[in-house]
Image (tube, rainbow, N blue to C red):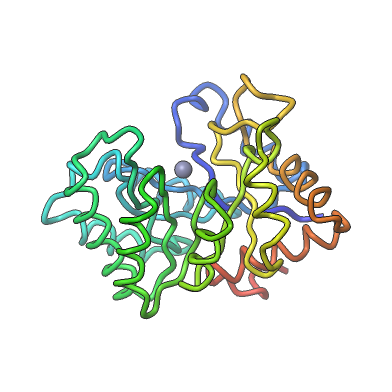
């Protein structure tokens, strides 16, 4: 069984002491591909360097809403340059976060708008982060609907919101939250969505699934979310894993041959 962790942060300081060992241990645990999501401008070159060094890693470049107020006139070109490199495949993670509001909301919206335009220009998928900002998020995505491709990561919204994402051409990704005791709504959504638009991810080192909550998350725990998704949907784990893997290749435009 091959698993693709479609959203991870191995460059987080939580991995500073054993990053190489964690990465080296992944293939034997069935994790054959990982998308390393970039969070801020300082991360762009770090992600590119990690991806260059580790052949089964892919990367994104972009500015997270938490860091939106560090966007400058040069940031767009920095992202463009990084995304010309091999296995640098998406603009992300970008979005709106009205839970923490680390950057002013008007700045978050402007920076998201710029990066959605950039993704369209480059014909690349986006990795989207939406926390308590559903209305503004959907408005902006609708304004960029033409050519929009990508994933709504760490999905926690309603079925109606998930449907909106599908209508916009997006995939919907679930992580450790699917295993939480109070996961009534994500479970309902996972049951009802079409198989060809689902993804799994860890968002490590955050969002550790049950029964490891409180510990650091890592890409190998994507298997726990896979098992839970199979249980919830009443599907065979192996068949579901195959379908999710193919979805991940498709959303990030990775040629199947490259996976031989
Ligand atoms: Zn993330």
Residue 245 x/y as whole percent = 70, 62
Residue in the image at 46% along x and 54% along y: 59
Residue at coordinates 28% horizontally, 61% vertically from top-left?
A: 115
Q: Is residue 209 above or below residue 252?
A: above
Name the quarter where the C terminus is drawn: bottom right
Front residue of this view, candidates 214 and 169: 169
Q: How many marks?
A: 0
Q: Quadrant of residue 225?
A: top right
Q: Quadrant of the N terminus?
A: bottom right
Residue at the outermost left position: 73
State which quadrant residue 138 falls in: bottom left
Decide which of 189, 71 is in the foreground and name it.
Answer: 189
> In the figure, is residue 131 to the left or right of 171?
left
Residue at far bottom of view: 146
Residue at figure coordinates x 46%, y 36% from the top left: 11
Which residue is located at x 35 percent, y 52 percent? 94
Q: Position of residue 151 (x, y in %)?
A: 50, 60
Residue 169 at x, y percent in the picture: 50, 73
Specify whether 97 is left or right of 241: left
Seen from the viewer's position, the closer of residues 178 and 34 is: 178
In which quarter of the view is residue 122 placed?
bottom left
Q: Position of residue 257 (x, y in %)?
A: 67, 75
């Amino acid at each position: 069984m091959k698993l693709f962790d479609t959203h991870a942060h191995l460059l987080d300081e939580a991995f500073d002491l054993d990053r190489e060992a964690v990465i080296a241990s992944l293939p034997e645990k069935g994790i054959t591909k990982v998308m390393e999501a970039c969070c801020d401008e300082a991360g762009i070159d770090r992600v590119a360097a990690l991806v260059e060094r580790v052949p089964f890693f892919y990367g994104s470049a972009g500015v997270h809403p938490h860091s939106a107020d560090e966007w400058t006139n040069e940031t767009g070109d920095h992202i463009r340059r990084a995304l010309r490199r091999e296995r640098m495949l998406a603009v992300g993670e970008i979005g709106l976060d009205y839970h923490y509001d680390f950057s002013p909301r008007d700045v978050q919206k402007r920076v998201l708008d710029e990066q959605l335009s950039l993704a369209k220009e480059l014909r690349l998928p986006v990795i989207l982060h939406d926390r308590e900002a559903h209305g503004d998020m959907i408005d902006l995505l609708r304004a960029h609907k033409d050519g929009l491709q990508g994933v709504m990561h760490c999905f926690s919204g309603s079925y109606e919101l998930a449907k909106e994402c599908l209508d916009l051409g997006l995939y919907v990704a679930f992580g450790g939250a699917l295993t939480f005791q109070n996961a009534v709504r994500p479970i309902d959504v996972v049951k009802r969505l079409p198989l060809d638009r689902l993804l799994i991810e860890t968002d490590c080192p955050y969002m550790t699934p049950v029964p490891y909550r409180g510990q650091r998350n890592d890409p190998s725990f994507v298997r726990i979310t896979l098992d839970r998704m199979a249980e919830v949907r009443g599907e065979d784990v192996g068949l579901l894993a195959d379908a999710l893997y193919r979805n991940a290749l498709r959303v990030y435009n990775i040629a199947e041959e490259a996976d031989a």
